[in-house]
Image: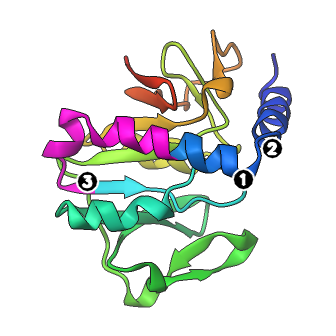
């Protein structure tokens, strides 16, 4: 199946959840994630800032900070590039282009992944081998092609899991695992 069709179908599925269902499922996803040894050993959590109907992230930032971990969030740059910068409090986020909240680039400190870093990766679909379909910009694939460190975990609702994604290209980077409200699958 074509990636555009998969994206459309997965967005439709995700949009069917009520706000309450999304909150409950997101809380279950984070509970599973935060119980892992990988989370307990992590120094930096590289995570997206949720918007629209994605698995929620920002309600869980306070717990991450309370657990003594740093948070890094993406900022978009020219030429479909992305970097991560440290986020010290939610108030540092401002809504930029496309409605995506980002910290002020000029005031931010660049974050580099370490061997103990964990990535919370948004996705529209993930298959049973860790192949991911995102929004089509290639930002995460480009970023991950440059960095070897850090475990990459896709955060999706179980309805977004597919058996196999056929429409892959050589630049698609697979995830190391996926977390849904039903549990965790490591590849």
The circle drawn on residue 179 is none
Name the mark nearer the viewer: 2 or 3.
Answer: 2
- Estimate the spatial distance between the alpha carbons at disc 2 and disc 3, rounded to whole Å: 32 Å
Quarter of the picture holding the C terminus: top left
Left or right for 141, reference 32? right
Give residue 143's position: percent from left, percent from top: 44, 49
Residue that badge 1 annotates: 19
The circle drawn on residue 15 is 2
Left or right for 67, reference 143? left
Residue that badge 3 annotates: 113
Left or right for 62, reference 180? left
Please rate how many residues cluster around mark 3, counting C-alpha atoms within 10 Å: few if below 14, some from 14 to 19, many from 20: some
Residue 9: say if magenta: no
Please rate how many residues cluster around mark 1, counting C-alpha atoms within 10 Å: few if below 14, some from 14 to 19, many from 20: few
Q: Earlier in the sequence, mark 3 or mark 1?
A: 1
Element type at mark 1: helix
Residue 34: say if magenta: yes
Magenta-drawn segment: 27-44
Element type at mark 3: loop
The quarter holding residue 35 reads: top left
Residue contact between numbered discs 1 and 2, judged by CB atoms under 8 Å: no
Tell me if residue 161 comes above or below residue 92 in the rendering.
above
Give residue 98's position: percent from left, percent from top: 74, 69
Name the mark nearer the viewer: 3 or 1.
Answer: 1
The quarter holding residue 102 reads: bottom right
Q: What secondary structure is the stretch in magenta mostly built from? A: helix
Give residue 77's position: percent from left, percent from top: 55, 69
């Amino acid at each position: 199946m074509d990636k555009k069709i998969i994206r459309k179908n997965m967005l439709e599925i995700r949009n069917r959840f009520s706000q309450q269902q999304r909150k409950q499922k997101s809380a279950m996803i984070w509970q599973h994630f935060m119980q892992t040894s990988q989370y307990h050993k992590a120094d930096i959590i590289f995570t997206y800032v949720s918007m629209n109907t994605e698995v929620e992230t920002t309600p869980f930032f306070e717990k991450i900070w309370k657990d003594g971990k740093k948070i890094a969030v993406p900022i978009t740059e020219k030429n479909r590039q992305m970097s991560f910068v440290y986020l010290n409090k939610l108030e540092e986020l401002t809504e930029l282009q496309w409605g995506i909240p980002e910290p002020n680039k000029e005031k931010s400190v660049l974050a580099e992944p370490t061997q103990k870093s964990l990535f919370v990766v948004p996705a529209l679909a993930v298959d049973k081998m860790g192949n991911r379909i995102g929004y089509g910009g290639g930002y995460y694939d480009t970023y991950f092609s440059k960095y070897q460190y850090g475990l990459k975990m896709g955060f999706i609702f179980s309805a977004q899991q597919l058996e196999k994604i056929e429409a892959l290209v050589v630049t698609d980077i697979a995830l190391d695992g996926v977390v849904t409200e039903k549990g965790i699958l490591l590849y």
